[in-house]
Image: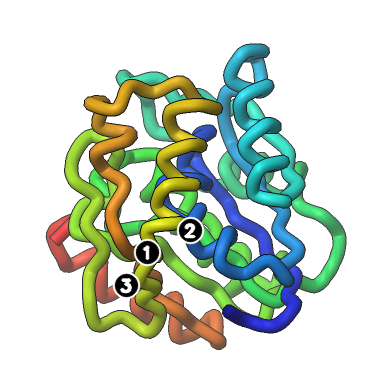
Amino acid sequence: MEASRKVIVVTSTPYDETLWVGGTILNNPAWKVFVICLSRAGDAEIVTKFNEALTFLTAEGTIGSPDNRPDQKPIPQDHIMKAILNLWPEQHIDIVIIPSPRSKSKRHKEIGEAMIALWRAGRISANILRIFASKDASIASSAKPIPGNEIHNTLSESTLDKKRYLAMRIYGYKNTSVEVTNIGNSESFWSFTNPFDAEKWLNLQKNTKPGS
């Protein structure tokens, strides 16, 4: 458990906040968490579920509407950056948590790269950047955290039960769905305190197979 921090979680779509970082949020009740979700604003049902999930997590947040369909086409980085900044609170943040640029998900990769570029350019102010770290940062297959990173949080059974409650009772996924079966017993993150180090890491990742 960490001390009181201002934390922003940036996600591609509703439920990512639960799958990737829900346990970490639940285990840090002193955090003041704001979730920026970048799609599905036009879906009233999913927006309601997203807001209910935030209430359960004792978090606040907002939701935007860039394309997140399965056949999604690439979005230019400046468009992603603009979408993020339009939803970004105007304040200094202690910790920002973002999707992985190594992801097999096109949108996760775009958002991760755009966030590092924003931090490197000084357009967002944050002390720490944390990046979802998993074997495959994609909802389509097993999201197993990578051991040995700077941040590796093992989750208690009580916390896992709360994540399953969010998945099944709030979001409405079946217990056999990948959204539920992907819930692992830990959450893992790469962590950076310097945007230049994050940019250097990103450049190295571009020569690494996504999700490996």
Whichever of labels 3 and 2 marks the residue nearer the N terminus, that label is 2
Tags 2 and 1 touching, CB below 8 Å: yes
Tell me the residue at 26%/75% (across/down).
204
Q: Horizontal and vertical percent for residue 116?
A: 51, 66
Give the residue at mark 3: 203
Tell me the residue at 50%/26% (across/down).
169
Nearest the viewer among 168 and 146 is 168
Using the numbered discs, state the Cα–Cα distance from disc 1 to disc 3 in whole angstroms.
24 Å
Whichever of labels 2 and 1 marks the residue nearer the N terminus, that label is 2
- Vertical side of 187 occupied by 37: above or below: above
Placement of the N terminus among the 4 image quadrants: bottom right
- Say which element carries label 1: strand
Give the residue at mark 2: 23
Tell me the residue at 58%/23% (across/down).
40
Tags 3 and 2 touching, CB below 8 Å: no
Nearest the viewer among 61 and 192 is 61
Placement of the C terminus among the 4 image quadrants: bottom left
- Say which element carries label 3: helix
Name which residue type carries label 1.
Glu
Tell me the residue at 58%/20% (across/down).
46
Whichever of labels 1 and 3 marks the residue nearer the N terminus, that label is 1
Using the numbered discs, state the Cα–Cα distance from disc 3 to disc 2 in whole angstroms.
29 Å
Horizontal side, residue 94 vs residue 129: left or right:
right
Give the residue at mark 1: 187
Horizontal side, residue 133 vs residue 131: left or right:
left
Name which residue type carries label 3.
Asn
Horizontal side, residue 153 vs residue 98: left or right:
left
Considering every residue shown, the one lying at the far right of the view is 90
- Vertical side of 210 occupied by 4: above or below: below
